[in-house]
């Protein structure tokens, strides 16, 4: 995107080298750092976009806020408590954080429609599908969806999970009172189903993505453009699109 400029890059294995040279292009005068904190110390940035790993994303985001950068978080694995902490840190810094479990427009629309459905339908559960080696469960998409649905209302369970005859884990895990079932198998990439049912009828909302990462690019860049107008945390691309005009 022509309105963005890369100011820093992080790769422990290539620290000190020029970004352009490392990716096989002409030098671009961006020195690769060993950590996000070092990169931002070397060259301040308006916004940090993080697609890294669940184990480091929170530290990266806090380091950015401490250095005056806004943050866009694509990385999954953060808990509701982590987001509370990031919201407080962002407010203290007077900066914005936009985090979305999924930056694809189809997933944002699913979230938007699901919040409406939960207001009208008492029974719902979430199914999360991802590649076999995905390290985190549930996915960022499913976790955010379940946490937010559970804030709309706690779904009705007609048979208490703790009284199930058989392994209760087979009924999935509870995320903010919403049952989430995570499938991790080869051939799956990234999908989520939100199932809403009434006796005799079902509404199935499905986001289904392949392996092309470009589906997340437009939403991520939209968040990076809008985050300068945000103070504190906004969670969910759909909120950025539909709640704020
Ligand atoms: N919100 C969304 O729309 C999407 C979220 N994701 C999430 O983003 C995260 C990354 O996913 P992918 O890009 O598929 O993984 P990936 O493994 O292809 O890329 C992650 C990159 O981060 C780097 N990295 C790991 N630890 C790092 C650290 N400490 N500092 C700097 N760089 C580090 C890795 O070397 C790698 O280059 C995952 O949590 C995934 O679930 C992925 C796609 C879309
Ligand atoms: O790991 C992935 O690939 C993806 N992760 C995100 C998630 O955890 O929901 C988004 C999308 O599912 C791709």
Image: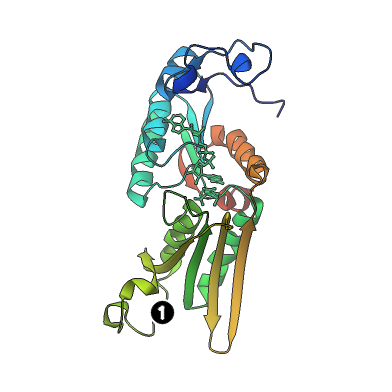
Work out whether residue 152 or residue 130 is closer to the camera in this orientation and state it.
Answer: 130
Work out whether residue 238 or residue 57 is closer to the camera in this orientation and state it.
Answer: 57
Q: Mark 1: which secondary structure?
A: loop
Q: Looking at the image, which residue is at 62% across and 53% down?
A: 242
Residue on which the image places disc 1: 156
- Residue that protrudes farthest toward the bottom in the picture: 200
Q: Which colour scheme is used?
A: rainbow
Left or right of 244 on screen, residue 42:
left
Left or right of 229 on screen, residue 213:
right
Q: Give x and y (percent) for residue 150.
A: 42, 65
Q: Which quadrant of the view contains residue 117?
A: bottom right
Work out whether residue 231 or residue 11 is closer to the camera in this orientation and state it.
Answer: 11
Q: In the figure, 88 relative to 151: above or below?
A: above
Work out whether residue 74 or residue 96 is closer to the camera in this orientation and state it.
Answer: 74
Q: In the figure, 223 relative to 43: above or below?
A: below
Is any part of residue 109 visible from this angle? no
**Ligand 2 near label 1 (Cβ, under 8 Å)?**
no
């Amino acid at each position: 995107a022509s309105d963005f400029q890369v100011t820093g890059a992080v790769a422990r294995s290539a620290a000190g080298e020029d970004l352009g040279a490392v990716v096989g292009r002409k030098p671009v005068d961006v020195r690769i750092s060993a950590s996000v904190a070092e990169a931002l110390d070397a060259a301040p940035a308006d916004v940090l976009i993080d697609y890294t790993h669940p184990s480091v994303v929170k530290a990266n985001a806090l380091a950015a806020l401490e250095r005056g950068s806004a943050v866009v978080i694509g990385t999954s694995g953060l808990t509701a408590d982590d987001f509370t902490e990031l919201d407080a840190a962002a407010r203290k810094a007077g900066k914005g954080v936009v985090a979305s479990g999924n930056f694809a427009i189809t997933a944002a629309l699913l979230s938007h429609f699901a919040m409406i459905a939960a207001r009208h339908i008492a029974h719902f559960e979430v199914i999360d599908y991802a590649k076999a080696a995905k390290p985190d469960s549930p996915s960022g998409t499913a976790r955010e969806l379940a946490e937010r649905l559970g804030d709309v209302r706690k779904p009705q369970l007609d048979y208490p999970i703790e009284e199930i005859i058989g392994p209760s884990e087979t009924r999935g895990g509870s995320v903010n009172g919403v049952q989430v079932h995570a499938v991790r198998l080869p051939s799956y990439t990234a999908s989520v189903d939100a199932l809403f049912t009434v006796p005799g009828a079902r509404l199935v909302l499905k986001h289904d993505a392949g392996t092309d990462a470009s589906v997340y690019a437009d939403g991520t860049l939209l968040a990076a453009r809008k985050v300068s107008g945000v103070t504190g945390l906004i969670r969910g691309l759909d909120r950025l699109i539909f709640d704020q005009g």
